[in-house]
Image (cartoon, rainbow, N blue to C red):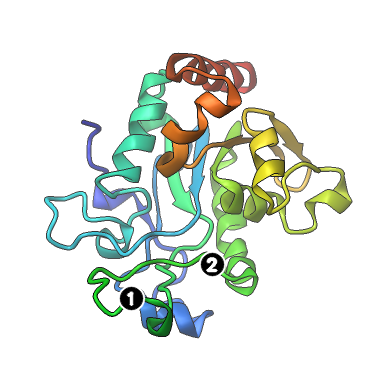
Amino acid sequence: MPDFPSSDSRNVLEPDCSRCPALVESRDCIAWGNGALDADVVVVGEAPAFGNPEADRWQGGNWTGMAYTSRHSGRKVRDLFADAGLDAADLYFTNAVKCFPRESESDEAEDAGTPTNREPAAEERANCRNHLVTEIEQISPAVVATTGKHATRSVLGDRSGESGESGHSGDSGGFIDSVLEPVESSELGTVVLPLLHPSYQNVWLPRIGYEYEEYVAEIRGVVSAHR
């Protein structure tokens, strides 16, 4: 099991941020980035899920206030980078959208129990992108690893196709084709490496023709080439 991050590494950029009224209503806590501020790799997720307030430590960012601290995705993505030879001093974890985007109650099943999350709206991603860019500028990483299509789109920008950074549109087919294909971002001054979201990693790895060990080796190779 990976080590749980220290709360001292929580990088609060705008306490009580209220840029997105719907997210203010749905969140319990803002899930800020956490990790080393001189990290070689910034790992970007989409947004925190509701999480599990009853869990032991790994409750999720909506409760811990730190990105990628859920029992499933948080531990899985941290294990992935540990397997690639990176330790805590090499890594910083954050989300494209830092608040839990709750599905509207009218769209949830009456007996659903745990609130479910929706995809962040384009306006929400745009509102939060300033925080994301600030983090990347602070840290100046060699590689920004984006986990999933929405994280990738947020990092590269919704207009990425117009700036030559194509193949990262919102359609799943376009995104899957971009996985493990590094993109030089002149805006951010770093290399962006699209990866599978940890929730879908086991499903999509065979479909892109990789065993887990091969996937880890590719990540290790890209990071090593740009450190």
Q: Residue at x 23, y 35 (%)?
A: 3
> Is the N terminus in the top left, top right, bottom left or bottom right quadrant?
top left
Q: Specify whether 169 is left or right of 99.
A: right
Q: Amino acid at mark 1?
A: Ala
Calculate the distance from the C-alpha at mark 1 to the C-alpha at mark 2.
20 Å
Which residue is more in the foreground, 119 or 80?
A: 119
* On screen, residue 94 above or below 98: above
Q: Residue at x 41, y 28 (%)?
A: 81
Which residue is more in the foreground, 2 or 141?
A: 2
Q: Classify mark 1: helix, strand or loop.
A: loop
> Is the C terminus in the top left, top right, bottom left or bottom right quadrant?
top right
Question: Where residue 183 sits in the image (x, y, percent)?
Answer: 73, 34
Question: Where residue 158 sits in the image (x, y, percent)?
Answer: 74, 59
* On screen, residue 159 above or below 82: below
Which residue is more in the foreground, 118 or 1?
A: 118
Q: Examine the image and state in which quarter residue 84 appears.
A: top left
Q: Examine the image and state in which quarter residue 78 appears.
A: top left
Q: Does residue 192 appear in the picture of this structure?
A: no
* Residue of label 1: 109
Q: Amino acid at mark 2?
A: Pro
**Mark 2 crowdedness (10 Å alpha carbons): few <14, some 14-19, many ≥20:** many
Question: Where residue 5 sits in the image (x, y, percent)?
Answer: 27, 43
* On screen, residue 221 above or below 14: above
Q: Which circle marks residue 132 in the picture?
A: none
For the residues bearing labels 1 and 2, Cβ distance under 8 angstroms: no
* Residue of label 2: 120
**Mark 1 crowdedness (10 Å alpha carbons): few <14, some 14-19, many ≥20:** few
Q: Does residue 84 appear in the picture of this structure?
A: yes
Q: Specify whether 197 is left or right of 225.
A: left
